[in-house]
Amino acid sequence: MLKRLIYTLNQMRKHRHALAVANQQARHGHAAQISAQQLKKQGINVLVLDFDGILAYHGANRPLPVMQHWLRECVQVFGTKNIFILSNKPMLQRRAYFQTHGIRFITGVAKKPYPDGLHAIQRLTQQPAQAIALVDDRLLTGVLASVIAGSRPVYVPQAYANFRQRPVKETFFLTLRWAERWFFRR
């Protein structure tokens, strides 16, 4: 944990400008408002998704219904072989859900912000880093990993949350996201 924190702080300093740009260009809605067709037109061939906050609230085992619908649209654009889940919490139930839908869940790699998961996806797909987009709700995990790997970060600051079910955890992550946005404001 300490090693990852030191790595994050070092990389944060190194990539401060790119993180500020991602923050400034952030979409101001949920991930369901991202157009898969627009990403494809921008040269994206591989879509990588965080789970917590992007597809569902923290601790959920499957995507929210609105995100299941959005995922079906993404599959029509990218195909299942070019959509991946890269989560720092690869719970067994989540992996099983995506396996039944033909979407690969990347496991066995260092947690974000280490770029190992994105590098693994690049090897699997034989796509250049610039053709891979990572959709994430955290600047200092997914967005930073994407910047380090040379792929395209898609920052979504409005994460899905369930404060009734997990008030402490959701408040913690809401506070982290707010602090990240404040720190990287322009």
Image (cartoon, rainbow, N blue to C red):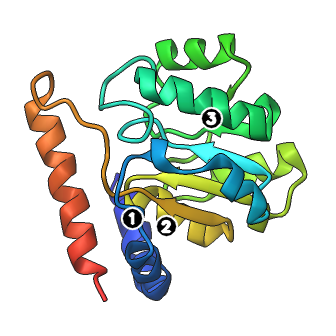
Label 2 sits on a secondary structure element that is: helix
Q: Which residue is drawn at 45% across and 74% down?
A: 25
Q: Quadrant of the C terminus?
A: bottom left
Relative placement, left or right, of 71 versus 4 is right
Rendered location of residue 1, percent (x, y): 35, 51
In three-dimensional space, the C-alpha distance between marks 2 and 3, rounded to whole angstroms, equals 19 Å
Rendered location of residue 71, percent (x, y): 60, 31
Q: Name the residue under label 1.
A: 139
Q: Which residue is drawn at 67% across and 57% down?
A: 38
In three-dimensional space, the C-alpha distance between marks 1 and 2, rounded to whole angstroms, equals 6 Å
In three-dimensional space, the C-alpha distance between marks 3 and 1, rounded to whole angstroms, equals 22 Å
Q: Mark 2 points at which residue?
A: 144
Q: Do the residues labelled 1 and 2 touch (CB within 8 Å)?
A: yes
Q: Are marks 3 and 1 in contact (CB under 8 Å)?
A: no
Does residue 136 sit above or below 130 in this rendering? Answer: above
Using the image as rendered, state which of residue 122 and residue 56 is in the foreground.
56
Q: What's the residue type where badge 2 is placed?
A: Leu
Quadrant of the image occupied by residue 105: top right
Quadrant of the image occupied by residue 19: bottom left
Task: Bin the neighbour count of mark 2 within 10 Å (Cα to Cα): few under 14, some 14-19, many 20 and up.
Answer: many
Q: Mark 3 points at which residue?
A: 108
Dot 3 or dot 1, earlier in sequence? 3
Q: Residue at x 52, y 24 (%)?
A: 68
Q: What's the residue type where badge 1 is placed?
A: Leu
